Image (cartoon, helix red, strand yellow):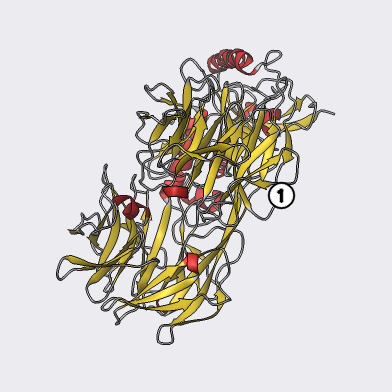
Amino acid sequence: MAASVRTVAVLGEYTLDTVRGCLLCAGRPVHLRPQAYRMLIYFVEHRGRLLSKAELIDKVWEGRAVTDDSIVQCLRDIRQALGDLEGQYIRTERGRGYIFDIFDPGAHQLAEAHVAPPVEQVSRDEALLQPLDRPRQGRSTHFGALTALAAIALITMLAGVWGLSSVGVLTVTAPTFLKLTSSLDLDLWPSLSPDGEWLAYSATESWGTIDEQIYMQAVGGLTRICLTCDDTGPKISPVFSPDGTRIAFSSGRRGGGIFTMAKDGSSPRRLTSRGFQPTWSPDGTEIAFSTRRTDWIPAEPYFSTSELWVVNVASGQTRRLAVTDGRDPAWSPDGRWIAFWTRASTGWDRDVFTIPAAGGAVRRVTHEATDDWNPAWASDGGALYFSSNRDGTRGLWRVPIDLSSGGALAPAQAVALPTAFVTYPRSGPKDMVVYSDATAESNVSLLSLETAAAALIGPPRPVTTGTRFWLPPHPSSGGQWVALAQAAIADHEDIFSVGRDGASLRRLTDDVFHDRDPQVSPDGRRVAFASDRGGRWGIWTIGADGGHLAPVTAPDAKRTWTRPHWSPDGASIAAWEEPGHRTVIFDAARTTSTPRMVLPPVPGAPTESLSQASDQRAWSAGGGLAVQADDVLAIYSFETGAYRTTTMAGAILGWIPDTPLLLLNDGSERRFTLVDTTTWQTTVIAYPSFIPEGDVRFGLAPDGRALALVHATYKGDIWLMRTLADGYPK
């Protein structure tokens, strides 16, 4: 029985599919973020009428507080999707609003379109490949003729690239899916053996802990075998060699690096002293890797860079690829290309690139204002899969690749999946793809801290509930309210505030930018945070009521600032500067200021450790700044301009006002440490039983009387997608 699709003509070959909720061009989906799609619908419904910003906010955003940037970004997305870059059809009336004026009133009719029945259940995007039964009218005969010619050219091209069986018609057989793991762990980094019979992957109870181990199990089986549990340290990102006899992986053992082992876990061999995300060359002689670990959610990096290297498996000799920043390398099946993703030089976006494996110029594959990452080659090398948030979730996308140039042959397509989250996709033999459906949530609670009794007063009082993922919180003095940052898993990364009883959850920022690291001022009136709203990461402040947004740092083409910390009097803000791995001081009352002070490096602390522990700082009322790097605890005196150092484990939470006491958290030992910074004497506060196991992080109030904790839980299973060579686009 044919499926019915109701469409609304927009412009030439552009239509709105009101059933599936997407924009089509010649029957094919065109990416629009959900809010931009809603704005386009409102424009279509009110074509020819001037729409003010106030009306758009009221109707499209339902009255929620948004900035002009949100409207402008949505308008930019719509114009780009429609090819209206000069604003010919969506006109801006300065000071008044916008008008959408592209329709012939007689052309705006609902049309019935029929899609051929699938061999199996047809996915959303595959069904959208079917042509409409009758053409839509354009604004003029001239435009319609040009659109028709363009459509014919597009169809002809797609026929060669994706195997269209007739003009505009594709015989679609939906991919099939099989859940390969089902446990309480977070299963990541899947890899299939060359024969498709075995699966290797990493598993852990909590993200980023030392218990990450590598397992193997038969595809379709239930029993998993731990290959690395005889050694300490995290082991991640396993990948089978082309002949299936060995597994390359990243390990923290013996100082870390890229290792290989037999497929049964025996005979581990160290190849490099550093590295993550290994990928084999097709002939098995070399392994490419990155120098930075990639998180399964795009929370990092702010400013760090990752190099791409290639190591010869037999000799151990290495060579560097000419890439400024490269992560998650993936070697093409023909051996010619290495795909990778990199962060944008400004802002937050990630894009996928390719580089010749022998070295040479890079070639951009994707260029969207979204996170495109985790590239993986299709088994025949004719396309790249990658994870992206283009449709509002962390989905799987596929872009055909020209192997002669390394560039994209056509726009990327979304792949319809039974899961809402995709990370670490990897291709296997026989048109197989494996990926993890990892998910996470975290909630915030409050505790009271009694430093005199060296005790925490509980049980924790819940502040948030639900399925959001909150980053480490920061309470105001007395724990009256808490500043929060939401991780950009499937929504904006914004700053929130919430009362101590969980009431009055308020979004302080609401736009397309990424805001995090909130720190409440000592008087509780303002929140300092890091944001990329200036084009690069900088420090901003906003009122506790969401008003008076102001930059503290001036835009800089070469430097970024993150991790703000208020001085006890609220007059200054310390921040972390990159490049350089250094702490700088800004005047909190001045906007777009330059640093008025730069602290010297911590003696005895390696530069890389400072980069990794850049948030470990706190300001004392006595004129000192504490800095933690590795196990070096340093106290900088503004009076003497020098450091005092000691060896001390634990992350700095903050000073206890009017005392020389500094509070550290050692999560691996489930304890806090109060350090008397005049004598270096310590008092240990063991975690009470009411603090949950797993990933727990804390924020200390400016007055030292309250602790906010965030407890994160993770879950992820491995899925197998099998695409059919005669059905799904190759």
Q: Is residue 335 above or below residue 713?
A: above
Determine if residue 366 is in view: no
Which residue, given by chain and number where applicable, does mark 1 sit on? 182
Q: Nearer the viewer, residue 264 or 387?
A: 264
Measuring from the top left, give residue 518's x and y in whole percent: 40, 62
Q: Residue at x 58, y 51 (%)?
A: 230
Pointer 1 local density, CA inside 10 Å: few below 14, some 14–19, many at least 20 = some
Above or below — where is 571 with respect to 540?
below
- Mark 1: which amino acid? Ser
- Rendering coords of residue 144 (x, y %): 57, 17
Relative to 525, say whether 515 is above or below.
above
Q: Nearer the viewer, residue 344 or 182?
A: 182
Q: Quadrant of residue 243?
A: top right
Is residue 563 found left or right of 24 in the rendered image? left
Considering every residue shown, the one lying at the far left of the view is 640
> Outermost residue, bottom direction?
453
Whole-percent x, y for residue 17 in the image: 66, 34
What kind of element bears circle 1?
loop
Q: Quadrant of residue 666?
A: bottom left
Q: Is residue 334 visible?
A: yes
- In the rendered view of the protein, which quadrant contains the N terminus? top right
Instruction: Left or right? Give the position of 529 relative to 424.
Output: left
